Image (tube, rainbow, N blue to C red):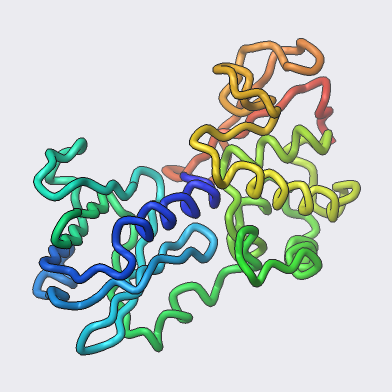
Amino acid sequence: MPEGDTVWRTARVLDRALAGQVLTKTDFRVPDLATADLAGATVVGTTTRGKHLLTRIDGDHLWTLHTHLKMEGMWQVYAKGDRWRRPAHQARVVLTTAVRQAVGFSLGIVELLPREREPDAVAHLGPDLLGPDWDQAEAVRRLRAHPDRPIAEALLDQTCLAGIGNLYRSELCFTSGVHPATPVAAVPELERMVHRAKAMLEANKERAEQTTTGDLRRGRRTWVYRRERQPCLRCDTTVEVTMTGEPGRERATYWCPACQPAP
């Protein structure tokens, strides 16, 4: 699943392409919106809340297009008439202006909401690591509300803090010297881990390639993420990986047995 900084960059791409532009055609390829037509409306802009994208469109009514990338989704922008780089059957939303097309492929959520209902779509989320509402103390409080929960699971809970995915949860546990299965209550300096989470996303939100090591060379961008059966960059111990979560929704967690001893 994309990280919060990836979604933040997606919003910037959509903003640059569509903000202030009049839609000449819209195509919503989901059953609930099959007859929706926003041609003639103006795109005000796109913002994010955690991993949720909110595209505001003003016409006869004030609308918010709420989308979520989930595991496989993405938005791509094309010059009008250019060939798409993904199959047409994967397109869920097509927004066309006089000169550009923004296409949302394999989106996990597509909702067209009256603007006054926009807050309802994201009200369940915790403080946004890249948002103006960021509140470290509240994020820590929400994490600590479930003291027996494994920290790797808690970090993915968007109702605690919004924006962390698989990459950052593994890297945060490593850089904190904490085994992913450690209960939240046993994590030393939880505040520092949460502070580091924000720092990681802030450092990467403008980058095309994410790094937590500060090294942009291939194979050295992360400490443990996707480095299973490779030597730890800090101590040379072989990095391990395990799948956790509900059947059908498992996620890979990476860690170094030496740098992150089991609790």
| Figure disc tally | 0
In percent of the image, x 19 and y 50: which residue is there? Answer: 91
29 shown above or below 88: below
Q: Quadrant of the C terminus?
A: top right
Along the line of sight, the residue nearer the viewer: 8 or 20? 20
In percent of width and height, residue 22 lies at 20, 71
Q: Is residue 152 left or right of residue 217?
A: right
Along the line of sight, the residue nearer the viewer: 77 or 246? 77
Q: Is residue 208 left or right of residue 129?
A: left
252 shown above or below 129: above
Along the line of sight, the residue nearer the viewer: 28 or 9? 9
Q: Is residue 18 left or right of residue 116?
A: left
Which quadrant of the view contains residue 175?
Answer: top right
In percent of width and height, residue 218 lies at 55, 17
In percent of the image, x 69 and y 11: which residue is there? Answer: 231
Q: Is residue 231 left or right of residue 64?
A: right
In percent of width and height, residue 99 lies at 16, 55
In percent of the image, x 61 and y 57: which residue is there? Answer: 157
In percent of the image, x 66 and y 21: which residue is there? Answer: 240
In percent of width and height, residue 195 lies at 79, 53
Which quadrant of the view contains residue 43?
Answer: bottom left
